[in-house]
Image (cartoon, helix red, strand yellow):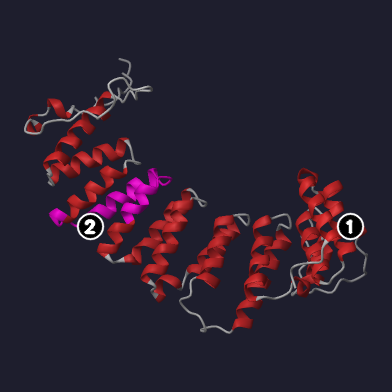
Amino acid sequence: MSEQPASDPPPPLLYSMREEWKDVQPLDQSDLTNPLVPIFYPPEYKDAMDYFRGIVAKGEKSQRVLELTEHIIRMNPAHYTVWQYRYDTLLELEAPLDKELALMDELALTNMKFYQVWHHRKLLLLKYAQPAAELSFISKVLAVDSKNYHTWAYRQWLLAHFDQEDLWSLELPSVELLLQEDVRNNSAWHHRFFVVFDSGVREGDEDREQVLRREINFTKQKIAIAPNNLSAWNYLRGILDRVEVKYATLKDFVVPYTTPREERPVVEEEVLDLDNPRPSSSASLPCALAIEFLADICLEEGDTTKAAELFTSLAEEHDTMRKRYWDYRVKECLGTQSTRT
């Protein structure tokens, strides 16, 4: 006897057919008589929303309202009105928020790109005020999508709002792990900058020069692994701009990345310079990002002619996709002095 294929589960019973909802007057969506572009909702969604409008009209906040709002949210996670009414109902019923957070664990993993999911979670944390487990949950979400904007924004809000040492303590190691997995993860680079420079929670705890040296050396090592990584170069620029250190201080590091490998001078025994790591053997050179950085160094030093030559090389050879931009930089060099001093 052959096995019968599994059939899809039957659709849930419409609220209009449920005895326990007979006391609610469903309300249709208020549309124009002849809408120009009518929206044809699936019957299940239209039925649920009609009853949602009905319970809002009567101001009901009950357990069945939580069941109804969860049903609608699973069909449409972006419906902010439903989310807000659910939150108000939770507070009215004094429902256990840890159980709601457990539900949000599931919904956030499957609907992480919806702002409303994270906003609801934030409201819960403001009431629940137990953030210790949140970073572990966030790590699970980032394992699925390591660049999801809403997840990173929520993480930064959590750290800044609760401002607890145990929450901050593992942030840099966590970011380093993410960058080991993907050195081009711009979100992780941005978060590192937030933790080191923008958090404002431990200002003065570390020596300024020590932090600067650590961050520059860390970034140099990452650039050496993948020189054509815009995120790392932007991070390096961000560090120097924040602490007002001239780009020219890194000239010895930058120059080897600006020449083709075959043009680099051959030495019998190259001295290992930990402060200025050389490009990896697999790196594609010259690096356009390094050439731009060196051109900005030339502008700092007042050598506009050399800067114009470097920008011209980008326009004509190394980064022709942005030729018009580099041509603009050339004209800027020849017409004005550097504004970065």
Horizontal side of 159 relative to 96 (left or right) equals right
**Circle 1 residues within 10 Å: few <14, some 14–19, many ≥20:** some
- Quadrant in which residue 63 is drawn: top left
Tell me if I can see residue 75 in this picture.
Answer: yes
- Quadrant in which residue 206 is drawn: bottom right
Horizontal side of 98 relative to 304 (left or right) equals left
Q: Taking 58 as reference, is 217 above or below it? A: below
Residue at image x 25%, y 63%? 127
**Circle 2 residues within 10 Å: few <14, some 14–19, many ≥20:** some
* Tag of residue 309: 1
Give amino acid for label 2.
Leu
Q: Quadrant of the C terminus?
A: bottom right
Residue at image x 18%, y 27%? 14
Give the residues in magenta: 92-121
Please say whether residue 110 is one of the residues in the magenta stretch: yes
* Tag of residue 97: 2
